[in-house]
Image: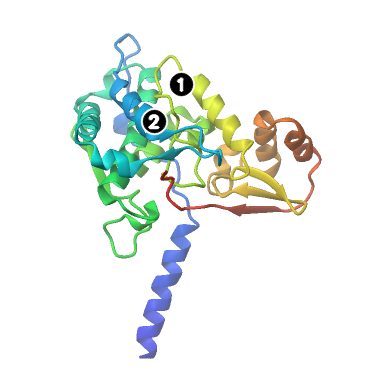
Amino acid sequence: MKLFRVFWITLLFIWVSTLNAAPKSELISFWNKSNEANKATINHSRWQIILDRYLDAKHYSGINRFNYANLAKHTVDKKQFNEYLSYLQRLQPRFYSRVEQKAYWINFYNALTVKIVLDAYPVKSITKIHKGWFAFGPWNDVHAKVSHQKLTLNNIEHGILRPIWQDNRIHYAVNCASLGCPNLSPTAYTATNTDKLLDIAAKDYVNHKRGVQFKNGKLLLSSIYKWYKVDFGGTNTNLIKHLQKYANGELAKHLRSYKGSYHYEYDWKLNNK
């Protein structure tokens, strides 16, 4: 009995440790290719239709909410949504320009996340969706195939987006279907609007209390800034500089003068309407 108890305590310790460990940015070399001479564009209009109809970007909470229940009931729209994901998976993204690829992978990640939640709905949190017994969420499960390569959400974010573009604003673009996450953009990313949308996403998140706030005189940050601190400069000083870049008025003022401790939290409840 004692050995049995030790076994389960060890498993619990390993599981809790994985919750606090963020995946590293490690390039999947297969995807490190582009054709800058290719001026072709990728059509994300079907994703835009889904966003227009099922995303509430004016929710009183300041957190965009997705209506999974309604999309699940609308056969035609659900079919169009699935066809959009199939379309993305038929493409050869390596043969497009880098700017086209960046928009492609962000939209693909976000649409695929919606698909994963939709297939499991109703569910209270995306963390409850997984294939393994002790897994935390679906991020390491294979949910797509592009160019004959099986893909997980972690592959897209940490094996493609982060290492290829090395743009910390990507953390504000990819949405994990949770209240603590940066907003799912109401506008589909394209080669022409990506840079602007990334700045908007960063500003919106930093100036919302789930991103950055002072509570009882202490700095309370999203756990994103703990998990991926390396992408935000690796030190508290560099992180503060990053936050100041996007912070408004009083928040920016408080950040400039803050000398206290750092605290982190994250809300994994589903971002459903």
Q: Is residue 209 above or below residue 203?
A: below
Look at the numbered discs 2 and 1 and tell me whether their residues touch, using CB distance below 8 Å. yes
Q: Nearer the viewer, residue 210 or 246?
A: 210
CA–CA distance in space, label 2 to label 1: 9 Å
Residue 236 as seen in the image, left or right of residue 80? right
Q: Residue furthest bottom?
A: 1
Q: Indicate which disc residue 194 carries.
A: 1
Circle 1 Cα neighbour tier, 10 Å, few/some/many (<14 / 14–19 / ≥20)? some
**Residue drawn at the location 40% of the way across and 34% of the way down:** 55
Q: Nearer the viewer, residue 182 or 165?
A: 182
Mark 2 sits on what residue? Answer: 106
Q: Nearer the viewer, residue 233 or 41?
A: 41
Three-letter residue code for mark 2: Ile
Identify the image quadrant of the N terminus: bottom left
Q: Is residue 40 above or below residue 69?
A: above
Residue 177 as seen in the image, left or right of residue 112? right
